[in-house]
Image (spheres, rainbow, N blue to C red):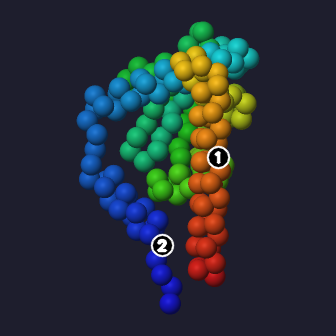
Amino acid sequence: MATQSPFSLLGNLAERAAQVVQPPAWLVHEGQQRLVLFLNHVLMQEPLAMERLVRQSGRVALVQWRQFSLALLVTPAGLFNLAPEGARPDLRLEVTNTNPFSLVQAALRGDKPSIRIEGDVQLAADLQWLADNVSWDVEEDLARVIGDVPAHTLASLARSAMQAVRQFVGRRAGDGAQQLA
């Protein structure tokens, strides 16, 4: 007898909830502003990344997932800003997987989501380079606040916890594949 995974039940529940519950526009805008600040914080740690983006100054990339979208304008400084309302995107990136739980599972496995790309090839290549080569050094930022030793200890604990979660998700994904076979 095949049993249904609780993850698929949660995924279906999340799908239905996302269709019914829409966050207010002000909350979406504030979330987008915070995301842009975070992206710029990470980019400012990598001068080479900013240099690559300077070449794309004035270009707009639209990232879409389900009903959520984020239009990013590349600034002359090689950073991001929210694009003005109604700006025509030079590049469209659409995450094709609509299930949030399967996206989280894939991210925990270290997989990138499948994306449909339309538009400027060079901008897409530069954004792909950023995704492959720029990462947030959480430990360094944490060390500025609480010191080197506590930051290193917390980062080590977080890495161990993430490894355990990845192993759990990997086993669950393998179990689910065996049940389908």
Q: Is residue 7 above or below residue 20?
A: below
Q: To which residue does mark 1 refer?
A: 160
Give residue 107's position: percent from left, percent from top. 59, 49
Query: For the image shown, how many numbered marks are present on the structure?
Result: 2
Q: Is residue 55 visible?
A: no
Q: Quadrant of residue 79?
A: top right
Give residue 149's position: percent from left, percent from top. 64, 25
Q: To which residue does mark 2 refer?
A: 5
Q: From the viewer's perspective, is 4 left or right of 132?
A: left
Q: Quadrant of residue 74?
A: top right
Front-lying residue, 79 or 174: 174
Q: Residue at x 57, y 24 (%)?
A: 142
> Amino acid type of disc 2?
Ser
Q: Residue at x 34, y 32 (%)?
A: 28
The residue most toward the bottom is: 1
The residue most toward the front is: 149
Q: Residue at x 43, y 61 (%)?
A: 11
| Mark before the other along the chain sequence, 2 or 1 | 2
